Amino acid sequence: VFGRVKDRRGGYYANADIHNHIGKTRTDELGEFAMDVDKRYPVITLVDKFGGICEVDLDLTEAKGAVWVGEIPCEIQQQTASVTGDVKNVY
């Protein structure tokens, strides 16, 4: 797939790491990327420069070959798991 990852302010995630279960890539300075994605598990995970994580489930049900998925809105998760439970607002 090919696409561009957009943040909630309308900007783009430049030079951010993206991975899934079969590969990884990095967005360019415009937030654009290209990578292989399995249609049976079309989830990609973006990790921004601060370590924030965003997961996106792409709709590839009708996809054949290389597909432009367009601008993908991606909002960094506000909560993550905590092993000890000691961190406020983390479960």
Image (tube, rainbow, N blue to C red):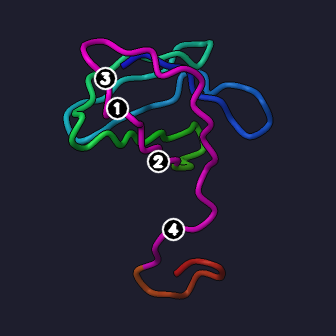
Q: CA distance from mark 1 to mark 4?
A: 27 Å
For the residue marked with disc 3, what is the amino acid? Ala
Label pair 3/1, CB-CB below 8 angstroms: yes
The residue at which mark 2 appears reads as 55
Q: CA distance from mark 1 to mark 2?
A: 15 Å
Q: Nearer the viewer, mark 1 or mark 4?
A: 1
Q: Which residues are magenta?
A: 54-82
Label pair 2/4, CB-CB below 8 angstroms: no
The residue at which mark 4 appears reads as 80
Nearest to N terminus: mark 2 or mark 4: 2
Nearest to N terminus: mark 1 or mark 2: 2
Nearest to N terminus: mark 3 or mark 4: 3
Q: CA distance from mark 3 to mark 4?
A: 32 Å
Q: Nearer the viewer, mark 3 or mark 4?
A: 3
For the residue marked with disc 2, what is the amino acid? Glu
User: Hey, which quadrant is residue 48 in on the image?
Assistant: top right
- Residue 63, numbered label: 3
Q: CA distance from mark 3 to mark 2?
A: 20 Å
Local secondary structure at mark 2 = strand
Local secondary structure at mark 4 = loop
Q: Callout 2: few (<14), some (14-19), or many (20+) C-alpha neighbours within 10 Å?
A: some
User: What percent of the width, then of the height, locates residue 79?
Assistant: 58, 68
Q: Residue at x 55, y 87 (%)?
A: 86
The residue at which mark 1 appears reads as 60
Q: Nearer the viewer, mark 2 or mark 4?
A: 2
User: What percent of the width, then of the height, locates residue 75?
Assistant: 64, 47
- Residue 28, numbered label: none
